[in-house]
């Protein structure tokens, strides 16, 4: 806009800019800053939502680390779930995308089928898997039995419950497959041909072209999926209610129970803050360690 | 060499078919169970395919709990969420992408930063806030936030806006059109397909959302589908067949929408997921 009235324009533009993004500014204040402030204040009180809140300082934070055994257990369960789920998700999604990117017929159909599970609401998939995992009447054990194997106690055993939730979590990985596939299709053909000319095998293409070029997308999805996994709630809430013997009690489920079952709003909010900081730390760790394996287009070798 | 090639192709197909089976069978199992009586579901050896389709479950869904009401509530909430998301995100994305002003870089970063915020952790604080406003057990906590933009959509529309030449809006600007007019008359028609993506994804997010209705709604006749499904599960007796029918009815609109608008789903995913 190189019109004569530039000064006026600049002012008007600034004004319009802020008007147009005002929902964003309001949203950040109303739905991020304000609730977080309120939550931090509440985390310093003892409050059952019925009587008046009592200010107790940092006692809730001290208590959850020293007195609440379930708290550490819920962190352990959640981390176990995340460490098991995220790498498997990434590997399987990458395999799915590589398969869909090969020269075969009917790719569109397979792509659609792979994506379908990620459409399904978690409540529905929880109910569905609850039934599939059933010891006596579930399809999975029927199938194992049919193959000659024994029945497995899936969500009814303390050892298998988290791996079971992981299997379920991997089932709806379709959206990541689609994202990786789009990334693969964006890889320039001449790079692949260069490997062919050098006499490279498929492994070389994967190792030196596909993996480096895809690494930023993998990193982004790894972080987003870790954040999602750390917030595990609906599946244990519906399927196991944290059991058996609290072996699927996730962090968020424990927070929920404290807030709405035990009437400990202060404690629940203190835990929310711990989880928030933990999530940030884990994202940061993934991000920092990624410097070694990530490939940025800026620094071409 | 040729045989090796065919071998590889067969392997790829094999993996694809196995993957497809794993993806589909649980869903087919759900639909199969929705046509069975609870007694038949608990019979050994398992009845793989019901001999007679039992349609009674689909009637019982509506009589056992106010399921029609859940449907209506969900549609009500979804419609307002879509309207809110379309208006607010287009406004914000336009402001960030097209108007040069101090502070827009910072606001863009702050907005993208919210993608990293763990949503479930935010929920108890949000519950406190809505409780403070005295709006628990109303639809407001489920609807109002949609009118304040969502980083995922802002980023997507921002990327999309960069593909539209600036000449269009600059010409209109010189003609004396104001920004709201430019957005409504020029940008919106050019962004139709991106707006469809926003609408579809907002539909999916809201339709599938379980945590917010669980926290914010108490009365059964305000339940949305996601929490309504839980009304079937009880410690004493769970009518599994009916529950499966209700679950099938819950996912049906999503699946229909997906088959109608598949390419919008794919484009939304790829724009949102590739660059962080």
Image (cartoon, coloured by chain):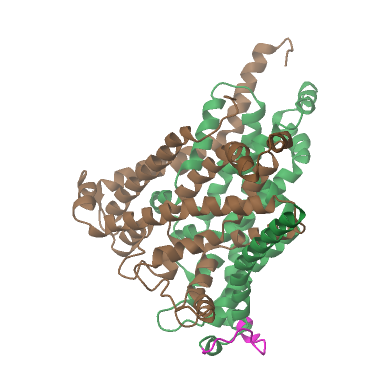
Look at 73% across and 32% down and name the residue there: B163
Residue A80 location, quadrant: bottom left
**Residue B260 or A4: which is nearer the viewer?**
B260
**Residue A134 or A258: which is nearer the viewer?**
A134
Look at 56% across and 75% down and name the residue there: B66
Give the dominant element type of the magenta stretch: helix, strand or loop. Answer: loop
Residue A218 vertical placement versus B245 (above, below): above
**Residue B237 or B31: which is nearer the viewer?**
B31
Q: Colour of chain A?
A: brown
Chain coloured green in the rendered structure: B
Instruction: Identify the magenta region.
Output: B43-58
In what quadrant of the picture does the C terminus of chain B appear? top right
> Quick check: B64 left or right of A250?
right
> Quick check: B170 left or right of A94?
right
Look at 31% across and 66% down and name the residue there: A246
Look at 78% across and 38% down and name the residue there: B190
Q: Is residue B9 magenta?
A: no
Mark yes or no: residue B276 visible.
Answer: no
């Amino acid at each position: 806009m190189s019109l004569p009235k530039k000064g006026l324009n600049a002012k008007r533009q600034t004004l319009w800019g802020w008007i147009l993004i005002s929902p964003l500014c309001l949203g950040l204040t109303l739905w991020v800053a304000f609730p977080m402030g309120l939550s931090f204040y509440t985390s310093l009180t003892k409050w059952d939502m019925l009587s008046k809140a009592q200010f107790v300082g940092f006692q809730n934070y001290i208590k959850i680390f020293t007195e609440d055994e379930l708290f550490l257990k819920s962190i352990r369960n959640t981390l176990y779930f995340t460490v098991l789920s995220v790498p498997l998700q990434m590997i399987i999604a990458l395999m799915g995308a590589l398969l869909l990117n090969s020269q075969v017929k009917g790719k569109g159909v397979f792509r659609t089928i792979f994506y379908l599970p990620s459409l399904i609401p978690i409540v529905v998939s929880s109910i569905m898997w609850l039934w599939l995992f059933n010891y006596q009447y579930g399809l999975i054990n029927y199938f194992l039995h049919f193959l000659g194997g024994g029945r497995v106690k899936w969500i009814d055993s303390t050892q298998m419950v988290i791996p079971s939730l992981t299997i379920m979590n991997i089932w709806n990985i379709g959206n990541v497959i689609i994202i990786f596939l789009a990334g693969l299709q964006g890889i320039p053909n001449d790079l692949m041909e260069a490997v062919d000319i050098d006499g490279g095998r498929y492994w070389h293409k994967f190792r030196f072209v596909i993996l480096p070029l895809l690494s930023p997308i993998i990193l982004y999805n790894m972080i987003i999926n870790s954040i999602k996994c750390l917030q595990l709630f609906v599946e244990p809430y519906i399927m196991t209610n944290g059991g058996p013997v609290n072996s699927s009690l996730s962090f968020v489920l424990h927070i929920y129970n404290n807030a709405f079952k035990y009437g400990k709003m202060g404690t629940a909010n203190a835990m929310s803050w711990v989880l928030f900081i933990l999530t940030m730390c884990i994202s940061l760790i993934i991000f920092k360690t990624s410097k070694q394996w990530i490939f940025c287009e800026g620094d071409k070798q | 060499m040729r045989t090796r090639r065919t071998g590889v192709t067969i392997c790829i197909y094999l993996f694809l078919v196995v993957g497809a089976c794993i993806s589909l069978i649980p869903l087919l199992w759900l639909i199969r169970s929705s046509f069975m009586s609870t007694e038949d579901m608990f019979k050994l050896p398992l009845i793989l395919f019901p001999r007679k389709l039992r349609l009674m479950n689909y009637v019982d869904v509506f009589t056992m709990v106010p399921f029609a009401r859940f449907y209506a509530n969900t549609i009500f909430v979804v419609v307002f969420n879509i309207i809110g998301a379309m208006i607010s995100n287009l406004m914000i994305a336009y402001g960030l992408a097209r108007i040069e002003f101090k502070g827009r870089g910072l606001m863009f970063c702050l907005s993208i930063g919210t993608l990293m915020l763990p949503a479930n952790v935010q929920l108890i604080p949000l519950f406190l806030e809505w409780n403070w406003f005295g709006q628990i057990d109303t639809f407001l906590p489920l609807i109002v936030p949609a009118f304040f933009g969502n980083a995922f959509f802002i980023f997507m529309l921002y990327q999309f806006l960069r593909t539209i030449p600036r000449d269009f809006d600059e010409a209109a600007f010189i003609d004396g059109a104001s920004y709201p007019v430019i957005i409504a008359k020029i940008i919106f028609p050019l962004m139709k397909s991106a707006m469809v993506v926003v609408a579809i994804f907002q539909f999916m997010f809201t339709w599938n959302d379980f945590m917010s209705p669980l926290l914010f709604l108490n009365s059964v006749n305000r339940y949305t589908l996601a929490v309504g499904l839980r009304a079937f599960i009880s410690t004493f007796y769970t009518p599994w067949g009916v529950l499966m029918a209700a679950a099938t009815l819950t996912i049906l609109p999503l699946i229909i929408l997906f088959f109608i608008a598949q390419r919008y789903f794919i484009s939304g995913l790829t724009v949102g997921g590739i660059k962080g």
